[in-house]
């Protein structure tokens, strides 16, 4: 009788210790509030490694804009397009060339007898001079070429802005994705610790014949499942930081201490039509297509004007240090030159037609892009609304799953349920926490996508437009 009483007393004492330890550990296995989960220092750093560098979203934006090679390439293309404007505009300015000749005619009274209709005399001389020409009018040809190049340069600048938006979107998605992976890793780490504690407790109870070896086996299965979850979560963090490093324009994968952030709401109302209109007016890629269309139209006008006459003023002056006695020592001449294209085998008409067709092609591409933007804005808004709903749902799911887990834990500790029920409750609580972490950062990712579709990531980040 005394042995039976002592055994029951020991069972009560072990159960009380186990329940108390589990209750103390349980809050670490679930978020106490819907605040974002962060990776624990134990899993965020590598032993012996340098402390991770702190990185905010604003700093990530600046780093990407400074380092990303795609953005540098777009910037160089914009600068090159600006030089084309200078090239075409140069046709409206005076053209001045210096010339120098030193000719030895060889035989006296040399003549070129074949190859031309000009004066064939070749005389000994050493002379220098200057030739200047000034276009008076080509009836809009050069002016339209210059306007076309200006629109092309404006399109290149819009392309630069569009590339900036794409780079910033990639940074936002990678940044929030890394935070998401760290939150999942934190849940996985806490789950592993909780299941390790459960295995230790059940093993002690089994040694005292208060639980069966079957319970120990189930606890070990749960521990190994959590180990697999932890391994996948660590791999997810590694992949997330690799993606973030690439988005920042870094050659090597770098781990950072990321700061929690909240994306500023863009388009906070339900007027999707207003958001579509805003995107159609502000998206830089649409602006680039409009500039390309205008550039093609002005190029078509320039090719049409190429069939018209060109009138230029020409002047020449110079002197000869050594020359034939029949040549004067100095010369000065000027005149008006009129060039009228008569026949070029259909070249000018074909060029005009080509430019017109390209302008129509760009106009159709613009119309298609506008349709795509309208669709993408509606989809992004729908995805953001759904992500916010899922976040609210997963908040409630975490609360209910934690309550179920606490109840299952209490029932198992007093022997009124099996470890299978406790394992299912643990699994449900873990799944709820992971879903909640994913939903929290999905909201931020979808908000970044909507900002991009509206053409407003750079504006929301306070980044100035390219010069």
Image: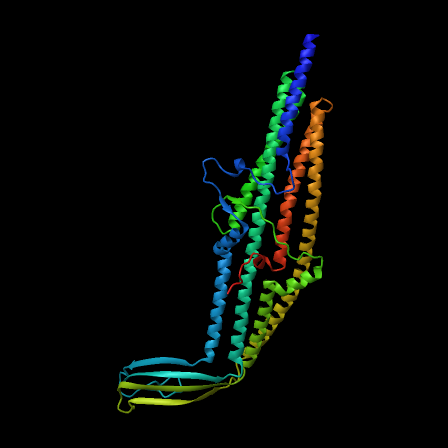
Q: Give the quarter of the image for residue 313.
A: bottom left
Q: Give the quarter of the image for residue 412.
A: top right
Residue 372 x %, y %? 66, 60
**Depth check: 442 or 16 in front?**
16
- Farthest residue in the right direction? 416
At 62% from the left and 56% from the top, the residue drawn is: 451
- Above/below status of 290 relative to 45: below
At 63% from the left and 52% from the top, the residue drawn is: 447
Residue 291 x %, y %? 58, 69
Q: Is residue 108 left or right of residue 23?
A: left
**Quarter of the figure that contains the N terminus:** top right
**Depth check: 109 or 430 in front?**
430
Residue 258 x %, y %? 54, 45
- Above/below status of 207 relative to 158: above
Q: Is residue 346 visible?
A: no
- Above/below status of 262 relative to 20: below
Q: Give the quarter of the image for residue 237.
A: top right
Q: How is the image coloured?
A: rainbow
Residue 224 x %, y %? 61, 29
- Number of numbered discs visible in the structure rendering: 0
Q: Is residue 382 visible?
A: yes
């Amino acid at each position: 009788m005394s042995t039976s009483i002592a055994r029951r007393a020991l069972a009560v004492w072990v159960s009380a210790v186990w329940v108390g330890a589990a209750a103390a550990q349980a809050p670490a296995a679930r978020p106490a509030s819907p605040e974002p989960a962060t990776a624990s220092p134990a899993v965020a750093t590598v032993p012996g490694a340098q402390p991770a560098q702190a990185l905010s979203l604003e700093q990530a934006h600046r780093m990407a804009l400074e380092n990303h090679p795609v953005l540098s390439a777009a910037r160089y293309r914009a600068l090159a397009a600006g030089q084309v404007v200078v090239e075409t505009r140069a046709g409206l300015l005076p053209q001045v060339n210096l010339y120098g000749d030193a000719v030895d005619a060889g035989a006296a009274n040399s003549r070129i007898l074949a190859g031309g209709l000009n004066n064939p005399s070749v005389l000994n001389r050493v002379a220098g001079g200057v030739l200047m020409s000034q276009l008076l009018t080509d009836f809009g040809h050069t002016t339209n070429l210059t306007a076309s190049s200006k629109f092309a340069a404006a399109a290149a600048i819009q392309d630069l802005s569009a590339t900036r938006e794409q780079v910033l979107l990639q940074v936002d998605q990678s940044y929030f994705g890394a935070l998401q992976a760290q939150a999942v890793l934190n849940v996985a780490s806490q789950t592993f610790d909780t299941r390790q504690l459960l295995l230790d407790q059940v093993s002690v109870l089994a040694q005292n014949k208060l639980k069966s070896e079957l319970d120990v086996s189930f606890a070990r299965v749960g521990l190994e499942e959590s180990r697999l979850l932890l391994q996948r979560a660590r791999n997810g963090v590694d992949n997330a930081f690799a993606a973030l490093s690439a988005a920042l324009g870094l050659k090597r994968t770098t781990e950072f201490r990321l700061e929690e952030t909240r994306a500023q709401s863009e388009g906070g109302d339900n007027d999707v039509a207003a958001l579509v209109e805003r995107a159609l007016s502000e998206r830089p890629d649409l602006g680039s297509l409009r500039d390309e269309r205008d550039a093609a139209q002005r190029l078509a006008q320039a090719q049409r004007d190429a069939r018209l006459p060109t009138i230029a003023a020409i002047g020449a002056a110079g002197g000869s240090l050594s020359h034939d006695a029949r040549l004067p020592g100095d010369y000065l001449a000027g005149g008006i030159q009129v060039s009228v294209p008569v026949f070029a085998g259909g070249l000018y008409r074909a060029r005009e037609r080509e430019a017109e067709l390209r302008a129509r092609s760009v106009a159709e591409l613009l119309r298609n892009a506008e349709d795509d933007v309208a669709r993408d804005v509606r989809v992004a808004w729908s995805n953001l609304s759904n992500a916010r709903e899922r976040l609210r749902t997963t908040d409630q799911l975490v609360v209910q799953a934690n309550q179920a887990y606490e109840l299952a834990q209490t029932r198992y500790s007093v022997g009124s349920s099996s470890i299978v029920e406790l394992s299912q409750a643990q699994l449900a609580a873990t799944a709820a926490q992971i879903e909640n972490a994913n939903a929290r950062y999905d909201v931020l990712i979808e908000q970044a996508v909507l900002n991009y579709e509206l053409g407003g990531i750079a504006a929301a980040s306070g980044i100035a437009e390219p010069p």
